[in-house]
């Protein structure tokens, strides 16, 4: 004999009921018990009726009419006209009884749990009657039996406890006498010995099916729902979740206790006692294998975790005090106090010093819990042996479940390191002695992020999802978006990275798309659908998304953006930047960002601050990390200045060359930054700091080659006018170098803890002499490279190479 249970979504409308009947008709010949829920949303509407009536609101009459109309419409859709009249009469009779009950509640202005149970029973009673009648229409030997005649409970209305001795006796007696092949039962309901209607708790239809299956020793219990089995995580939160093919009773109970909604937690116990397999199937995809729950499953040595689940909206209560140490009975008194108030404890942990006990309860029970505990320990609190109860709200629990976790070491480490890498702070931890469950309490706002992070860690083979938020879509930013778009397939296939751009911004607008921006149309989305840009608002949006593996990419020269890097890092969001302002600001700020990066395990990469895409900073770090000592750094660090002085030949004016460099994207948006030497000062400062020197920008000695009028220009236009005005001055500088067969190079040096920058005449024997175009060159003179310096040379300016450097940092950050 088999027991099949169909949930509310499976009996939502007439087509669903036809699908059920067709499915049952195709079953092999045998005896079947069918348990059904109310039509979808009917139970919620019935509850509304009760509460509206108790509040003297006539809305309940409208809802009763809607419930009646819905059932009558289903009758008209399911049955021929000649068969409808007695069914409609039966429904109307039931609806009249419901309305009378609500009218009584309306008069007394009180809704007891007993009355609410009676009201809620109408949904299952109606659906089971209609389905049994439709099975008859399919030519099947079917009857409907009221569960209240067989399942006897206590008087705990709302979530009654079953008397299994009496219930099993009645169920077996009924099945010995009834020979019908298909027997339909309303789920969710039972009755007291005095024939008062009770309910078994929301989701109780599953429980009804399990009670019946255990009583008759069925060979299989099928739970038909709207998903293809228990999932590795909630698919509404984790898109990559997939059905679990097989799972043990204990694992299923753990997952259902921690929020897996597919099966009602008490359902498993009766079936487990009789070793009855439970098959979870999808009514809308009946060919899917679903999930099989049974006593023994095939254990995969390589997969310790079976599923991940969680409970939102919980709070922690901590009882602590020096008076608890070594004194027995505190735990007992704490849990008895909560038990007396019928408060469900969902999490427990205690320090080994016995100094504190922490329990987790649902948010709705917090105030009641506090009163109960304060009352129980009033004397100890007064005597200051115990502190007043500490309450922490806005929390949730995530649980990693698996029978095989005890056989494989490192599961806990993998769990907590994955959470840590994404800056998800763990407030409390509990692990059962059976090692089938590791639970962690975290902030409620991190719930979705945590589930996705853990699912990725335990279940997902690559690709790894990377979420980018890009600020600055000018020359560098637009090239970066182009490169990301072009490399999508390569990154996916070769590096197993799924890179999504979630947010973009320019100086005026910002635009976000949770599912990823189509990079072919990014400028259209930004211009047409973007909101007003503000650096702080952009940062808040990024943090509110709270996505795992998030990176903020700054392609601007904005001080506003540079000064909020710390906010990103504190939220576990990596920062990739070609903006030199942050790392060349005060030394304390630079150190703070480095410390935050380490503390919150958020990457902070700025290779393009010096030398665009050249590996200048990474090479320096490799030298230092491997134990080498930096003696001296000599560098041409301005691709724009090198381009300008290499092309300042013939009859071209200095102004013309500067404008050409600006138009090609070799200079900063404001070319005064390059020509003043400020850009080079920032770069050598960053290298000095990476060497461990606490230099400030004003510690760097600079010999400017610009006339004072140029240095004091109040605008770019005014600057260009002054360059034109001093054209002969610049020609004289060039002439002096050419006369001595030397070349002009703007050089930065770091040696003995000090740094200098300035324009110099370089002779033909120096490596800088042959430096062409916009190339940069860095000479590292170190303990190991003392005879010949380590040389890094290449293009040091340009939107495309800078973008490629930023892109390279993004890929490094994913590792």
Image: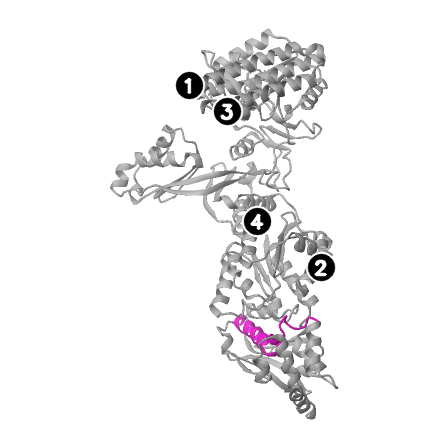
**Residue 348 in which image quadrant:** top left
Q: Marks 1 and 4: in contact by CB < 8 Å?
A: no
* Residue lying farthest to the left in this orientation: 383
Question: In this rendering, would 421 be left or right of 504?
Answer: left
Q: Which mark is residue 201?
A: 3
Q: Residues within 10 Å of mark 4 (few under 14, many from 20)?
A: some
Residue 567 is situated, as x and y percent measured from the top left of the image, at 51, 57
* Residue at the disc numbered 4: 545
User: Counting residues from the N terminus, which is met first, the one under dot 4 or under dot 3?
Assistant: 3
Q: Is residue 36 left or right of residue 320?
A: right
Q: What is the spatial separation of the Cα atoms under label 1 and label 2, in whole angstroms?
A: 70 Å
- Please, what secondary structure does the residue beneath circle 4 have? helix
Give left or right: position of 149 versus 661.
left
Q: Which residues are magenta?
A: 664-691
> In front: mark 4 or mark 1?
1
Q: CA distance from mark 4 to mark 1?
A: 49 Å
| Viewer-nearest residue: 390 or 38 | 38
The image quarter containing residue 603 is bottom right
Q: Position of residue 328 (x, y in %)?
A: 31, 36
Judge depth for marks 1 and 2 and give the one in front: 1
Q: Position of residue 552 (x, y in %)?
A: 59, 57
Q: Which mark is residue 108?
A: 1
């Amino acid at each position: 004999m088999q027991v099949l249970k169909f949930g509310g979504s499976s009996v939502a409308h007439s087509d669903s009921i036809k699908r059920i009947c067709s499915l049952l008709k195709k079953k092999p010949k045998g005896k079947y018990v069918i348990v059904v829920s109310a039509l979808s949303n009917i139970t919620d509407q019935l509850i509304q009726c009760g509460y509206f009536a108790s509040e003297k609101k006539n809305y309940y009459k409208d809802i009763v009419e809607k419930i009646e109309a819905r059932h009558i419409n289903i009758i008209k859709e399911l049955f021929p006209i000649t068969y409808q009249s007695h069914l409609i009469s039966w429904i109307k009779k039931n609806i009249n009884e419901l309305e009378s009950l609500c009218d009584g509640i309306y008069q007394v202005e009180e809704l007891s749990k007993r009355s609410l149970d009676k009201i809620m029973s109408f949904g299952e009673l109606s659906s089971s009657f209609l389905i049994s009648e439709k099975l008859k229409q399919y030519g099947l030997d079917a009857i409907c039996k009221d569960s209240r005649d067989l399942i006897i409970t206590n008087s705990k209305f709302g979530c009654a406890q079953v008397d299994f001795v009496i219930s099993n006796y009645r169920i077996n007696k009924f099945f010995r006498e009834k020979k019908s092949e298909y027997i339909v039962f309303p789920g969710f309901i039972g009755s007291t010995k005095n024939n008062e209607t009770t309910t078994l708790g929301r989701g109780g239809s599953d429980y009804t099916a399990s009670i019946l299956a255990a009583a008759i020793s069925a060979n299989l219990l099928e739970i038909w729902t709207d998903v293809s089995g228990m999932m590795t995580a909630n698919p509404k939160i984790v898109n990559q979740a997939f059905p679990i093919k097989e799972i043990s009773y204990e694992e299923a109970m753990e997952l259902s206790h921690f929020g897996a909604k597919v099966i009602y937690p008490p359902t498993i116990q009766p079936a487990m006692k009789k070793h009855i397999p439970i098959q979870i199937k999808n009514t809308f995809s009946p060919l899917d294998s679903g999930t099989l729950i049974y006593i023994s499953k095939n254990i995969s040595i390589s997969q310790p975790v079976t599923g991940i689940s969680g409970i939102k909206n919980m709070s922690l209560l901590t009882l602590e005090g020096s008076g608890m140490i070594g004194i027995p009975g505190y735990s007992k008194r704490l849990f008895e106090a909560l038990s007396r108030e019928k408060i469900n404890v969902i999490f427990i942990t205690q320090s080994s010093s016995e100094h504190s006990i922490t329990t987790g309860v649902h948010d709705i029970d917090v105030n009641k819990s506090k009163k109960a505990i304060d009352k129980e320990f009033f004397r100890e609190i007064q005597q200051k042996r115990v502190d007043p109860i500490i309450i922490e709200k806005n929390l949730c629990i995530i649980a990693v479940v698996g029978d095989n976790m005890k056989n494989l070491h490192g599961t806990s480490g993998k769990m907590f390191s994955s959470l840590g890498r994404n800056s998800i702070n763990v407030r409390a931890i509990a692990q059962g002695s059976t090692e089938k469950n590791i639970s962690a309490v975290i902030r409620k706002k991190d719930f979705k992020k945590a589930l996705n992070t853990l699912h990725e860690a335990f279940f997902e083979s690559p690709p790894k999802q990377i979420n980018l938020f890009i600020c600055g879509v000018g020359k560098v930013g637009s090239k970066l978006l182009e490169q990301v778009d072009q490399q999508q397939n390569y990154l996916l296939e070769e590096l197993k990275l799924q890179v999504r751009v979630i947010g973009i911004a320019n100086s005026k607008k910002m635009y976000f798309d949770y599912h990823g921006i189509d990079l072919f149309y990014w400028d259209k989305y930004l211009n047409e659908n973007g909101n007003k840009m503000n650096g702080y608002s952009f940062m808040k949006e990024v943090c509110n998304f709270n996505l795992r593996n998030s990176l903020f990419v700054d392609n601007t020269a904005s001080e506003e953006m540079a000064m909020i890097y710390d906010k990103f890092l504190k939220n576990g969001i990596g920062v990739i930047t070609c903006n030199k302002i942050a790392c060349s600001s005060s030394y304390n700020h630079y150190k703070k960002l480095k410390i935050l990066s380490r503390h919150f395990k958020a990457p902070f990469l700025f290779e393009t601050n010096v030398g665009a895409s050249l590996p200048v900073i990474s090479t320096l770090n490799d030298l230092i990390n491997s134990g080498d000592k930096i003696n001296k750094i000599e560098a041409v660090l301005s691709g724009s200045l090198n381009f300008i002085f290499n092309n300042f030949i013939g009859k071209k004016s200095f102004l013309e060359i500067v404008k050409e460099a600006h138009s090609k994207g070799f200079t900063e948006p404001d070319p005064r930054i390059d020509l003043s030497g400020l850009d080079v000062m920032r770069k050598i400062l960053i290298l000095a700091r990476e060497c461990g020197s606490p230099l400030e920008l004003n510690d760097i000695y600079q010999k400017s080659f610009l006339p004072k009028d140029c240095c004091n220009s109040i605008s770019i236009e005014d600057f260009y006018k002054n360059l034109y005005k001093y054209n002969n001055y610049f020609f004289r500088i060039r002439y002096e170098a050419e006369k001595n067969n030397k070349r002009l190079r703007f050089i930065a040096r770091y040696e003995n803890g000090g740094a200098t920058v300035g324009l110099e005449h370089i002779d033909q024997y120096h490596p800088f002499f042959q430096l062409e175009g916009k190339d940069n060159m860095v000479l590292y003179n170190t303990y190991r490279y003392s005879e010949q310096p380590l040389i890094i040379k290449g293009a040091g300016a340009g939107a495309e190479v800078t973008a490629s450097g930023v892109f390279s940092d993004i890929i490094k950050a994913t590792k």
